[in-house]
Image: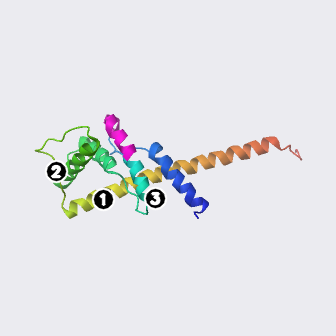
Amino acid sequence: MKRNTEVQKDISDIAGVFTDPIIVSPGGWGDTLPDWLKQAITLERLTENVRSLRGEPMTGTDAEACAYLYTAGLEAPMDGDWSEIYLYISTEVCRRHKQVDMPADIAVESLSDYRMGRLLDLKRWIFNRRTQIRQEHDRADRRERKEQEQARQSAEQPALFKF
């Protein structure tokens, strides 16, 4: 049987599918993400949660990595490794969500082990960053509720001694 904290974490993870921010490269390009990619991120986060219920470790999704690299590419030129990774992940996400046909001359079908490792590192970082943001928001909400409850209690309790 799951403990209360494990159940709360599972609920937080499910809520995070819909409420966690989309992690983009800092630089102001986050508002240019296509709507279909935002929807793909939500769908892939749901799939990732199902995998975690089977015991697999959670990471960022392919769509999240695509969004991050998309915004990073608009901010500054990428080196050869990251360009190849971006084309690979874009090919995968576009095919999976049937939104855009990736031109054959730029589609990348596979990555070297080194580049795949870098992609997995990026996806882990994205997941850790978005869960960190969610935990900070949860802490702030709990702190605010506690302060409101204390203020309510102090307002309801009459002062026994007034000096």
User: Is residue 128 visible to the viewer in this orientation of the structure?
Assistant: no
3 or 2: mark nearer the eye: 3
The image shows residue 36, relative to residue 127, as above or below, that is above
Give how far apart the Cα atoms at labels 3 and 2 are: 31 Å
Residue highlighted by disc 3 = 53
**Picture quarter containing residue 74?**
top left
Looking at the rendering, which quadrant does residue 33 occupy? top left
Decide which of 35, 101 is in the foreground and name it: 101
- For the C terminus, the quadrant is top right
Q: Which residue is mark 2?
A: 108
First in sequence, mark 2 or 1: give its number.
2
Specify few, some or many for label 1: CA neighbours under 10 Å numbering under 14, 14-19, or 20 or more: some
Amino acid identity at mark 1:
Leu
Q: Is residue 153 left or right of residue 52?
A: right
Residue type at mark 3 is Leu
Q: Position of residue 158 (x, y in %)?
A: 86, 43
- Give the image location of residue 66, x and y in percent: 28, 46
Residue 157 percent across, percent down from the top left: 83, 44
Mark 1 — residue? 120
Instruction: Compute the Cα span from label 2 to label 1.
Output: 17 Å
Q: Which residues are magenta?
A: 28-43
